[in-house]
Amino acid sequence: MENLSPPPSLKLNSNPVESWKQWKELFQLYIEMTSLNAEPVSQKVAILLHVTGEECLEIYNTFDEVSSDSLNGILAKFEAYFFPQRNITYECQKLFLLVQRVVREIFRNSLADSKDPYLVLLLYRFTPVLE
């Protein structure tokens, strides 16, 4: 198992939380399979920082009071860094679509019960045709 290649460097795409989760799992499997648990902590930390890639090394250098005494401590710092990040544009779009769907249902329900012929025509014009 010594010839096992390390996980690829972490690619921070549009969803860094999921990328981090997957990469961390791959790294922990790599540590287990190559028997690096028996190695000194400083060597494991060096491997972690080397394998994560340049982007994560820059992130690591921004951490306050990072103790290189513990691999778990460094992983916890990365967790704290990545988990608050969300794709704001995506979250806003999800909220917008939810509100739009609710308003559309309210509008359709109120128009369906209406006796006004103009409102019924409006409902008819904006009802999608199922093919």
Image (cartoon, grey):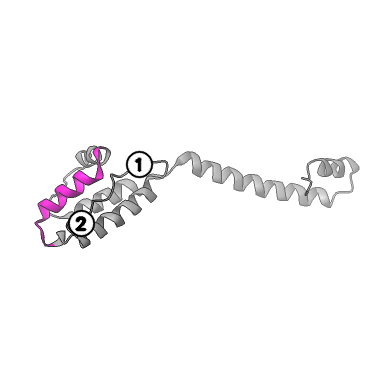
Q: Amino acid at mark 1?
A: Leu
Label 1 residue SS: loop
Q: Amino acid at mark 2?
A: Asn
Which residue position is annotated with label 1?
12
Q: Quadrant of residue 121?
A: top right
Q: Which of the image's four quarters has the N terminus?
A: bottom left
Q: Is residue 82 magenta?
A: no
Q: Residue furthest front?
A: 3
Q: Quadrant of residue 116?
A: top right
**Which is more foreground, mark 1 or mark 2?**
1
Q: Which residues are magenta?
A: 38-54
Q: Residue at x 25, y 53 (%)?
A: 76
Which residue position is annotated with label 2?
72
* Residue 35 x %, y %: 16, 62
Q: Residue at x 30, y 46 (%)?
A: 81
Q: Is residue 29 above or below residue 121?
A: below
* Residue 97 x %, y %: 60, 45
Packing grade of label 1 (10 A; few <14, some 14-19, many >=20) is some
